[in-house]
Amino acid sequence: MKIHEYQARALLAGADIPVPDGDMVTSVEDAVLAAERLLTESPPVIVVKAQVHAGGRGKAGFVKVVRTVDEVKEAATFMLGNRMVSPQTPPEGFEVDRLLIAAGVDIEREIYLAITTDRGARTNTLIASAEGGVEIEQVAEKRPEAILKVPMDPLDGLSPFQARDLAFQLGLGGRQVRQFVAVAMNLAHLFVETDASLAEINPLVITPASEACPDGQVIAIDAKFNFDDNALFRQQAIAELFDPREEDADELRAKEAGLNFVALDGSIGCLVNGAGLAMSTMDIIKLHGGEPANFLDVGGDASQEAVTEAFRIILAEGTVKGVLVNIFGGIMQCDRIARAIVAAAEEVGFTVPLIVRLEGTNVDAARAVLEEAQDRLPTMRTATDLGDAAKQVCAAVG
Ligand code: GDP
Ligand code: MN
């Protein structure tokens, strides 16, 4: 589960990681009020930032550093009135309905700091770079040696000496070191406590030296978190941060029906029981020159309701030109699923080719059910095996 930057900043602040003051707003009027408040309290720089579940906002023009209320008004009007398109969004972009109006900071250096699980090393890993900011993806691609990685002990977590060592490798000095160590240690605790799968601060900035901070201040001005969905049952405060408007509408519907669904770009809808079978179904469609429109696992004990909802979701996308149903009856009995398919297909109603491949327990009874329904479902064809099913559906969609 992802959250917004303003929510992530609140988590950081709660973990004693410095972040600038700011307000989340949903209208231009409130953006102006927030800016007026900040301008009376902070240095005269304001950042207007679109709150969407995608990065690359800076380059897309959806992070604006400004100095006056009029400029805040202009930036807020633009962001709330246009969709944001970045390399991290779909081509049509995301609608923006929330903004963060935050106190701006002067930047001396931008550092990248994140924690995620390194599956290869089987540890949570602190990742850092002295070259943080909006170019971090290019840095990672072109000069991977500029990305530092520190494995965290599974039991002890991050050790202060590791954080200090990292601070020196990043070229920090003086009072910056102690501040950085505190940020890294607090972030490591927060990561574990909240069952995060990603905790990223980019950039973590060093401000120029001032009287109050002779070596500058270490402060987080952007943050991104991802949480393990399987842990949300014990993370109520995190679960409450969920914003359904940021989710794919079909994926949300599927989740509510207990289906495991991922939308894809192709034209062949897939309805399969079991994630492994769903993967191999997608593979074999591709082998025969087709493109799957989705990944859909109805689970091992799919009910008629679940199958019906699955058909609805698959067919809701006008882009689906054919549907492949691939069910292996293990615990599930094929004749039960065949009746569910027929009932669901009749209820939802469709005109695209439907290829059904069933195998396993009670498969003969299931074939009889499908045969009996053939007249009512003229676009339905049965397949003898998975290869035949994939060939048929690819041929049917052209
Ligand atoms: P992202 O592009 O979605 O990652 O958005 P960020 O919040 O990271 O902002 C992008 C860039 O805008 C940062 O790397 C900074 O260079 C700049 N920026 C953001 N906030 C401030 C600020 O308070 N002051 C200054 N001077 N620049 C900022
Ligand atoms: Mn950023």
Image: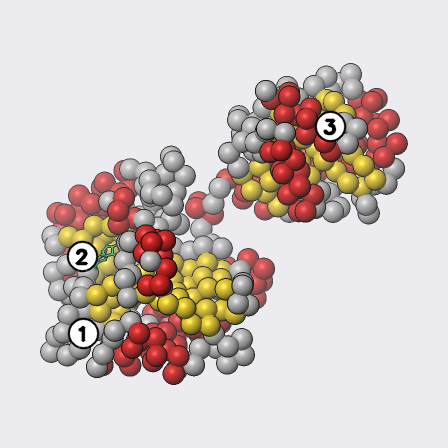
Q: Would you name the residue on which mark 3 appears? A: 388
Near mark 2 (Cα within 10 A), the count class, few <14, some 14-19 or many ≥20, is many
Image position of 75 (left or right of 263): left
Image position of 357 (left or right of 250): right
Near mark 3 (Cα within 10 A), the count class, few <14, some 14-19 or many ≥20, is some
Marks 2 and 1, the one that precedes in the sequence: 2
Marks 3 and 2, the one that precedes in the sequence: 2
State whether residue 310 is above or below residue 76: above
**CA distance separating discs 3 and 2:** 62 Å
Q: Is mark 3 within 8 Å of ligand 1?
A: no
Q: Quadrant of the C terminus?
A: top right
Q: Please tell me how many numbered marks the rendered image carries.
A: 3
Image position of 386 (left or right of 3): right
Near mark 1 (Cα within 10 A), the count class, few <14, some 14-19 or many ≥20, is many
Q: Amino acid at mark 3?
A: Asp
Q: Quadrant of residue 329?
A: top right
- Work out whether residue 282 or residue 239 is closer to the camera in this orientation and state it: 282
Provide residue 47's location: percent of width, then percent of height: 21, 55
**CA distance separating discs 2 and 1:** 19 Å
Task: Please name the residue shown 45% across and 61% down the image.
Answer: 198
Q: Would you name the residue on which mark 1 appears? A: 216
Provide residue 157's location: percent of width, then percent of height: 48, 77
State whether residue 348 is above or below residue 283: above
Q: Would you name the residue on which mark 2 appears? A: 46
Q: Amino acid at mark 2?
A: Ile
The local secondary structure at tag 1 comes to loop
Q: Is mark 1 within 8 Å of ligand 1?
A: no
Q: Amino acid at mark 1?
A: Gly
Image position of 384 (left or right of 78): right
Task: Please name the residue shown 50% across and 77% down the image.
Answer: 153
Marks 1 and 3, the one that precedes in the sequence: 1
